[in-house]
Structures are given as C-alpha cells and as structure tokens.
Amino acid sequence: MTKPPAKAIPAQEPGAFEAGMAAEAIGLDILLAEMRALAALIPGHEIAPRSDSEIEADFDNMPV
C-alpha cells in the first residue's frame, strides 16, 4: 500500500495574516468597550477605569 500524495496547501494572499490580526484587534477593542459600559451599570462601581500603562505595570513586577 502506498500513501496518496499530500495535497498542496493553497497559498494565502499577501496580507491575509495582517488583515486577520487587524480584525481581531478591532473585535477586542469592541469587547473592551462593551465590558466598560456594562461595568458602569453595576451599582457601586464608580472606580475610574485603569489606563493601559497602569495595567501593564502590574505585570512588570515579577521577579526574574
């Protein structure tokens, strides 16, 4: 028994990866906006949202 030849993977058009990443970033931005809007509806939730740099600073304090 011989194996049938593998099918060739079709070449993706140039920029398909970048377009996919851009679409994902747009979706994540929309999700973040929705989460912040819903958080504003929670009673007692009056804390100002943290900036991206403040959130990132929480991850930079891990010892090496």
Image (cartoon, grey):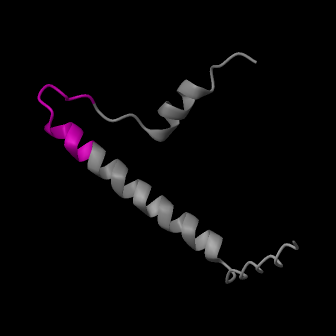
For this view, does 14 lie left or right of residue 19?
right
Q: How many marks?
A: 0
Q: Residue furthest top?
A: 63
For this view, does 7 lie left or right of residue 30?
right
Q: Is residue 45 magenta?
A: yes
* Image quarter hosting the C terminus: top right
Going 88% across and 73% down the picture, which residue do you hit?
2
The one of 3 and 12 positioned closer to us in this rendering:
3
Q: Residue furthest front?
A: 1
Residue 35's place in the image compared with 30, above or below, is above
The answer to which image quadrant residue 7 occupies is: bottom right
Rendered location of residue 28, percent (x, y): 43, 54
Q: Residue furthest left?
A: 43
Rendered location of residue 54, percent (x, y): 48, 31
Rendered location of residue 3, percent (x, y): 84, 72
For this view, does 53 lie left or right of residue 40?
right
Rendered location of residue 17, percent (x, y): 64, 70
Going 52% across and 37% down the picture, which residue do you hit?
53
Q: Is residue 9 magenta?
A: no
* Image quarter hosting the N terminus: bottom right
The one of 9 and 38 positioned closer to us in this rendering:
9
Going 49% across and 61% down the picture, which residue do you hit?
24
Going 35% across and 57% down the picture, which residue do you hit?
30
The one of 24 and 33 positioned closer to us in this rendering:
24
Query: Which stretch is magenta?
Result: 36-47
